[in-house]
Amino acid sequence: MKSNVEKISTFLFEAHEAGDKFVNLEKGMKPKDFNEAYQIQKQLRQKLPRGPLGGYKIALSSKIQQDYHKISHPVYGGLFKSEIFTSPQTIVLGNYHRMSVEFELAFELSDHIIDPTIQRNSENIIKDISNVMPAIELIDDRGANYDGLDPLSLACDNAWSGGLVLGEPIYNWQEKDFLDIQSSCEWNQEPKLTTGVLDAKPFENLCWLINELHSSKSELNPGMIIITGSVFKVRQAKVGDKINHILSDHGKVSISVI
């Protein structure tokens, strides 16, 4: 008899292969807790023909989102190495069931990350980081209905990971005061949106994620890329969109959607 983990991961794999719309997992197809959900996620990633792991992403990163979905922490998923691109990048919308984008900081992990004995906090997390970059996350929500979204189902489905586009690393990032760095979104000819890059609590979320991954003995390697939540609301992309994420005078990420 198949285990629950095998049964659910196979169901999700077949749904991905068929291009089915995302639905919440229910009854016998729903994991009992997040530990089981992440076991299912890991098996799903191994079944999908998207290659090796290149890092991780966070979903439901804000307290407002967590309160709405009745959880007390974010949800994470894996980023595939083959889907981590450099800016500028042209994105083919037809490669996704339904694509949205978010605006984030990305962290490249240092050799220090392999030490599982340290509880990461705001003082020591710097040692785990080799580079910080502006990023645009690509989300494939498989046409989901966001009302009533089940976080356990989201965790099983790899947190809708669709890829990532990276800008150049911030020069001398260790010497920057991130309180002074503004994150700006340019979307076609619309008025520019600007906010503080720390509004999404990227360093706090990075600590949470690394502690979670080490506690579950998940794969964590130097050079992996971690993204930790968007400073602007997720937004669906369409053909013809030209989108920039700019970090003050510290570089930008650009995508064109065709």
Image: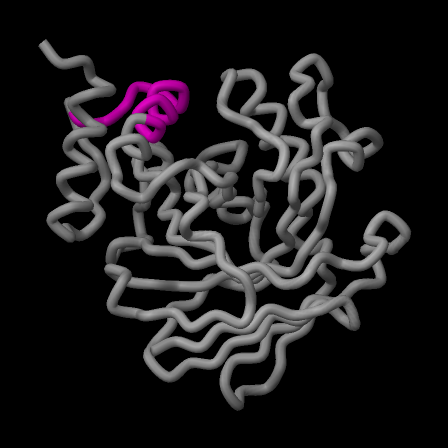
- Toward the right, the furthest residue is 175
Left or right of residue 118, residue 59 in this image: left
Residue 81 versus residue 89 in the image, above or below:
above
Tell which of 18 and 151 is nearer to you: 18
Residue 80 versus residue 256 in the image, above or below:
above
Residue 196 versus residue 25 in the image, above or below:
below
Q: Position of residue 159 (x, y in %)?
A: 39, 42
Left or right of residue 180, residue 230 in this image: left
Q: Position of residue 72 (x, y in %)?
A: 53, 32
Q: Chief secondary structure of the magenta span?
A: helix
Task: Identify the residue shown where x is 15% and y is 46%.
Answer: 17
Q: Where's the C terminus, which quadrant?
A: bottom left
Residue 103 among those drawn in magenta: no
Task: Identify the residue shown where x is 76% and y is 29%.
Answer: 121
Q: Which residues are magenta?
A: 29-42
Q: How is the image coloured?
A: one colour
